[in-house]
Each structure stands twice: as structure tokens, then as C-alpha cells.
Image: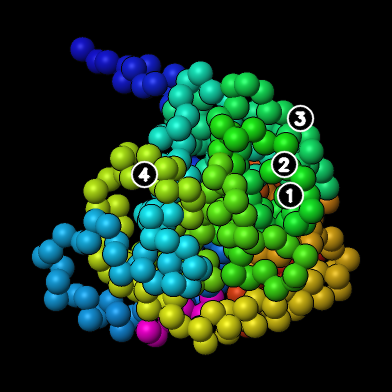
Amino acid sequence: MSCDFLALAQPGVQKLSPYVPGKPVEELARELGLNPSDIVKLASNENPLGPSPLAVQAIQAALPELTRYPDGNGFALKQALSERFDVPPAMITLGNGSNDILELITRAFVGPQHEVVFSEHAFAVYPIVTQAVGAKAIVVPAKNWGHDLSAMADALTPATRLVFIANPNNPTGTWISRGDLEAFLERVPENVIVVLDEAYTEYVEASDMPSGLDYVSSRPNLLVSRTFSKAYGLAALRVGYAISDPAIADAMNRVRQPFNVNSLALAAAVAALGDVNYLGESRVVNRQGMLQLEAGLADMGLDWIPSRGNFIAVDLRREAAPVFQALLREGVIVRPVANYGMPNHLRVTIGLKNENQRFLDALARVLASV
Ligand SMILES: *Cc1c(COP(=O)(O)O)cnc(C)c1O
């Protein structure tokens, strides 16, 4: 006897496509018979500097306690975040990466009777968490690749429970201005929760962009989500956080796993948060790398979407999949984004100078031959 278990899965789950991650270096090395050190991975918006030495030390110091369960409340990390951002610990929720935060807020507040609003070309986790709870996704067409906030406000109905906004957005790198965010928040009813996903906020150096933290105290329906995976360089450890009204934090706390953030991640995150030099260097490397890539792409006559993240979406003006495959054969891993409705773009993470150059050289060769 055999049972069709997929037919038994929740209807939303049956229709889901799993998240497609960047190709791991080890996998490509196996496939090509190459040394992993010969491969350049610019595919997952990881920090090219390697981890903060202070974070590594903190992990080493925490190792003897591996037999113990982590602090399920993450006291020390919440304390450090509370001091850094001047918000009470009761407004902080820790997540196993900020993906965990996106899932917690959805599971705590959204059911099959609800609608969740987000933009076309927005982060792939929004449709996944929405469908997983059986809610209806309302995908609002993008404007110049970015969020069209007034159209998103128009899309709100009495059934809307949650809105996801990524600022800057991944994979487009597009951003929203302070004025546009404020106008949007004015139009959102107080029983609709707005998740402002600021995964790349530490890279933002321009002053015309809002920080969600300026609004959380006055807008109880706003949740700001951030991560240690990008500018803080701790993607492998999975640690993110939300800052929200304490009542929203309370609801998320009820559905989260008791020890969702492990002790090595907690220790490393506290250390990384305190490593001001590392963050500063991450910004410098990103700014210089962005200029280097933009100059190289311009030399090739290619276009791109201006980005405020640590990545850039390149417009190849042709199907990107074969170019992606040819780049793999050159030992360069970037990210195809056809699953984001962008079949002609490749998303490239800003790397170190030599990594960016490897990509540019490989792209020039590939475009001449494919
Ligand atoms: C990378 C990313 C995240 C965070 O991922 P975690 O590693 O789970 O913290 C969240 N939102 C966006 C838009 C991202 O690009």
C-alpha cells in the first residue's frame, strides 16, 4: 500500500515551491572537480570579510557550555540590543535568523481567512510563509522594480492582516524614501501589521532612507525585522531579531520554539554587535565593491538596478540562465532570479576586490561566447 502524503499536506503547503538557496561552494567544487578555494561565491549576500574576530572568540569562550540548553530568553543579546537601539527588552524578539521572525509573525497572526500584501519581486520568504498558513497572497505589481507603496495601500482590504515591506528589497536592491513610508503608514489601519524587513539596513549610508526604529514607538502595528546574517557576517549561525510593540512580541513568543536561537549564535551576536570596526569595514568594502562592479558593468555596456544593499541585480537583456550556468563553469557562483519574475537578471553579491574582478572577467568571457 502506498499513501500520497503530499495530498495530505495542508492545501497551502501542497502549492508551495521550496526556497531556492545560492549554490554552495562545496557542491560546485564536487561537480567541477575543483578546489573550493578556486571558487568565488557571490550568491547569497554574505559578508565577504569573514566573521568578526570578536564573534569567533565569543564562540570559543562559549564552547565548554555546549551541554547546556541556551538561554531561551536570550537575556544578554536582548540587553545589548536594548542598549544599542534604546528600546525596552520587552519589544525585542529573537529569531533563528530573521526568516524565523517572518515566520513567527505570520504564524502568530495570520490564518486562512486573511490576506497578506507584498510587492512583486520582493523577498521569496514572504510568499512561502503566507502560503504555509493558508492565507491569500496579494502581490502588488512593482514600479521601476521597487515597491509601489501607494498601490500597496490601495490593495488593503478588511481581510488584510499583514503587509511585508523590504527596505532595501532583495533581490532588486530598491529602497523606499522616508516620505513614502510615512504616507503609507498613515493609510494602514491599526489592526494591520506592517513588517518592515531591514535585513540590509546597516549598509545604508544615505540619509534619505527611513529607519523603522524611528516609528516603532509611535506605531504599535509596525514590526521592524533585522538580521546578523548580512553586515554582521554571521549567516551560518542563524540569528535575527524583531523590534515591535510588546503585545506583538508576546504573541510571537507564544509560538516560537523554546530555544530557537542557540548559545553560540547568542554569544557571537553580542560580540558582533559590539565590533564597531568590523561593521565600519564591512560598509567600506561594500561601498568600494559596488563602485567597482558598477564601473565594470558600465564598461561592458550592461545595465543594473541601482541598489542600497550588498548586492546588485544586473540586466543582461537576454535570458540569464545560460549565463549563470556558464559562470558556474568559470567557478563563479551568482544568483539567478527568474523565480522572482526576473529572468533576464542575475543578482551578484558585492565581494572582495579580487572576487568582484573574477566575476567581471568571467562575465566578459561568458558574454562573448554563450
Ligand atoms: C537575507 C535576508 C533576510 C534574512 O535572512 P536570515 O539569514 O534568516 O536573517 C531577510 N530578509 C531579506 C530581504 C533578506 O534578503
Q: Quadrant of residue 76?
A: bottom left
Amino acid bearing label 4: Asp
Looking at the rendered image, the disc whose residue lies closer to the viewer, 3 or 4, is: 4
Q: Reading the chain from its start, which is encountered first: label 4 or label 2? A: 2
Task: Identify the residue position indicated by label 1 in the image.
Answer: 182
In this picture, residue 148 sits left or right of residue 87: right
Q: Is residue 102 left or right of residue 296?
A: left
Q: Earlier in the sequence, mark 2 or mark 3?
A: 3
Q: Amino acid at mark 1?
A: Glu
In the rendered image, the quadrant that contains the C terminus is: bottom right
Q: In the rendered image of this protein, does residue 172 appear above or below residue 270? A: above
Q: Residue furthest top?
A: 1
Query: How many numbered badges does the structure rendering display?
Result: 4
- Name the secondary structure under disc 4: helix
Res 142 → quadrant: top right
Question: Circle 2 sits on which residue?
Answer: 186
Q: Residues within 10 Å of mark 3 (few under 14, many from 20)?
A: few
**CB at disc 2 and ligand 1 closer than 8 Å:** no
Image quarter for residue 6? Answer: top left
**Amino acid carrying mark 2 in the image:** Glu
Q: Is residue 50 magenta?
A: yes
Highlighted magenta segment, given as a residue range: 48-54
Badge 1 crowding class, 10 Å Cα cut-off, few under 14, some 14 to 19, many 20 or more, is few
Task: Check disc 3 and give the amino acid type.
Answer: Asp
Residue at mark 4: 250
